[in-house]
Structures are given as structure tokens and as C-alpha cells.
Amino acid sequence: MQRRVSEIIAGLAVIVAALGFLAFTFSSTRTAARNGYILHAQFGHIGPLKVGSPVKIAGVTVGRVTKTELNPQSYAAIVDFSINPKVQVPKDSSAAIESESLLGGDYLSISPGGSNTMLKPGGAIIVTQSAINIESLLGKFVFSAANFASNTAKGGGTPAPDSGAAKTGLPKTGLSGGGGSNGAQ
């Protein structure tokens, strides 16, 4: 009986802690929207960017992503984000989805433009750069390296280092670098 009571108390403590974390997460993502103004941007692909991800200018967090949705006509991703009301974003700014590290942690990066006209609440950043899929890039690199190795093994790779001297009729000096001088002056 004593063991069952301790298990119930431990279970309740875990549930209370989980509810506390949920409440904190919900309140931190919603306060950015209430304290700032909303802007929009449209991307071809947003990768793992999600609601609550930071919005940064020059590496400084100035807002949060508040909503992501699909444009049913263009099949592009629309990202809504809030910006600190003290920060004004020029109308000709650009937005890009960047990664903090190879392990993830994507964020929305804004590069301010030079315009004197600022975006108003509800405005949109037109110039955008979609997320780069690191896994896809690595896969392409591995495939091209394997393809290169296969071609080299079949004899279709780069020419041998000494083939240039043989073609031009120049003597082989045995010196690397091909500077044309053997050091005697």
C-alpha cells in the first residue's frame, strides 16, 4: 500500500511539471504576438521552421514566428511573425530561413534594406530565401563524390600531373610548383 501511494505522488508530480512546461511554452509564444506587430513573408520551403522560432536582425532576437500556413493557390509557405514594436523594418528588407547549427535550431533572419519607408503592421517582406535542406545537400555531395570516384577508377577522371610536361615537350625537372626556375641564378 505504501508503494502505491508513492507511485501516485510521483505520477502527479510528473503531470504537474508537464503542465507547467506547457503553460510556460504557450505563454511565451503568445506574448510576442501581443507585444509586437505582425509582418508576413512567403517562402518556397520553410524546412523545420516552426511557430515560436526566433526572428533575428544582425543576430539579435527581435521577434518570434507566430504562424505558418500553406498558400493554396501558389503552394508556397506563408510565415507570420511578430516584431518588437521598438524595431522598425525598412520596406526593402529581405528575409531568409537560416540554421543555428547542423543539428537544427532554424530561425528567421531579416536583413534590413536601405529604404526610409518602414513596413507597417500587416506588411509583407517580398524578397525571401527559402530554407536550405542540409540533408539533401549532404546526399548530393556524397553522390557526386561517389560518381567522381567511379569515373576516376574507369579512367575518366583528371589527367595525371606530369601529362602537361609530356604534351608541351618541356623537360621534367622533378621540382614541384612548375616555377620554371631550378633555383640556380
Image (tube, rainbow, N blue to C red):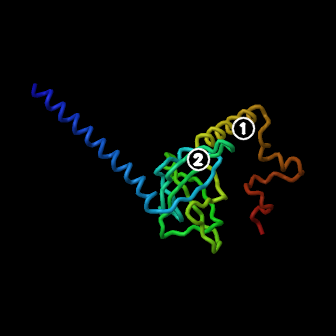
Which residue is identified by label 1?
148
Report the residue that reaches farthest toward the top.
Answer: 1
- Amino acid residing under circle 2: Ile
- Split into 4 quadrants, where in the image is the C terminus? bottom right
Residue located at (20% from left, 35% from top): 10
As drawn, 68 above or below 154: below
Of residues 136 and 146, which is closer to you in this image? 136
- Marks 1/2 in contact by CB < 8 Å: the verdict is no
Residue 11: x %, y % from top left: 23, 34
- Amino acid residing under circle 1: Phe
Report the residue that reaches farthest toward the bottom.
Answer: 116
Residue 80: x %, y % from top left: 55, 53
- Element marked by disc 1: helix
Of residues 12 and 103, which is closer to you in this image? 12
Q: Residues within 10 Å of mark 2 (few under 14, many from 20)?
A: many
Residue 129, quarter of the rendered image: bottom right
Residue 1: x %, y % from top left: 10, 25
Which residue is identified by label 2?
46
| Lateral position of residue 130 relative to residue 83, left or right | right
Residue 149, quarter of the rendered image: top right
| Lateral position of residue 68 relative to residue 1, left or right | right
Residue located at (77% from left, 42% from top): 158
| Lateral position of residue 135 relative to residue 143, left or right | left
Residue 117: x %, y % from top left: 63, 72
Q: Residues within 10 Å of mark 1 (few under 14, many from 20)?
A: some
Residue 96, quarter of the rendered image: bottom right
Which callout, 1 or 2, points at the residue further toward the start of the chain? 2
Q: Nearer the viewer, mark 1 or mark 2?
A: 2
Of residues 68 and 155, which is closer to you in this image? 68
What's the distance in space between the residues labelled 1 and 2, CA to CA? 32 Å
